[in-house]
Image (spheres, grey):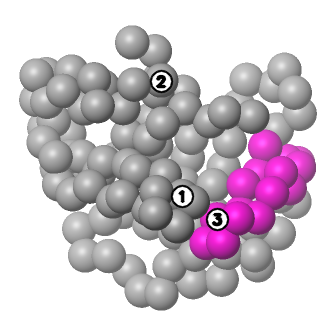
Amino acid sequence: MTATIEVTMDALDAEVTADFWQEVLGYSHRYLHEPYVVLVPDEGDGRPRLVIQRVDAVTPGKMPVHVDLRVDDPDAEVERLRAIGATVEWVVDDTASGGIRWTTMADPWGILFCVCPARKE
């Protein structure tokens, strides 16, 4: 299974943080879907998307910058990752409000990352 990497950054003020990183990286502001601001490189540029996620507070144990793995079959990928040593930390199901369901996992060293459905654009 192939995953697409996004870099996700927690921020107390997502729009100010996105404006800063847009200038730093030369990315375009793709869209705002509260609580996220998504920045993208030019088409054909192999760099990953940058997702700025508004948070109200720091989550203990979660790094403020983390990797999201975007995959076609998140459930199958979670099981594959468990088989090679990752653990499931928690699952967020935001589908009732039009969002997505994702799984936060930890690698063998305890570093958290998320498994999310591939973007359909």
Amino acid residing under circle 3: Tyr
Q: Quadrant of residue 22?
A: bottom right
Spatial separation of the CA atoms under disc 3 and disc 1: 11 Å
Residue 20 seen in this snapshot: no
In the displayed structure image, the side of residue 3 where residue 82 appears, left or right: left
Q: Quadrant of the N terminus?
A: top left
Q: Quadrant of residue 23?
A: bottom right
**Residue under numbered circle 1:** 99
Amino acid residing under circle 2: Asp
**Residue under numbered circle 3:** 36
From this view, report whether residue 5 is shown above or below residue 94: above
Observer-nearest of 21 and 83: 83
Instruction: Tell whether position 41 is magenta.
Output: no
From this view, report whether residue 92 is shown above or below residue 87: below
Spatial separation of the CA atoms under disc 3 and disc 2: 21 Å
Q: Which residue is pictured at 36% across the width and 32% down the height?
A: 74
Disc number for residue 110: none
The residues colored magenta run 25-40
Q: Earlier in the sequence, mark 1 or mark 2?
A: 2
> Dot 2: what SS?
loop
> Dot 1: what SS?
loop
Q: Nearer the viewer, mark 3 or mark 1?
A: 1
Q: Position of residue 7 (x, y in %)?
A: 55, 46
**Residue under numbered circle 2:** 72
Spatial separation of the CA atoms under disc 1 and disc 2: 16 Å
Observer-nearest of 23 and 40: 40
> Dot 3: what SS?
strand
Amino acid residing under circle 1: Gly
In the displayed structure image, the side of residue 3 where residue 29 appears, left or right: right
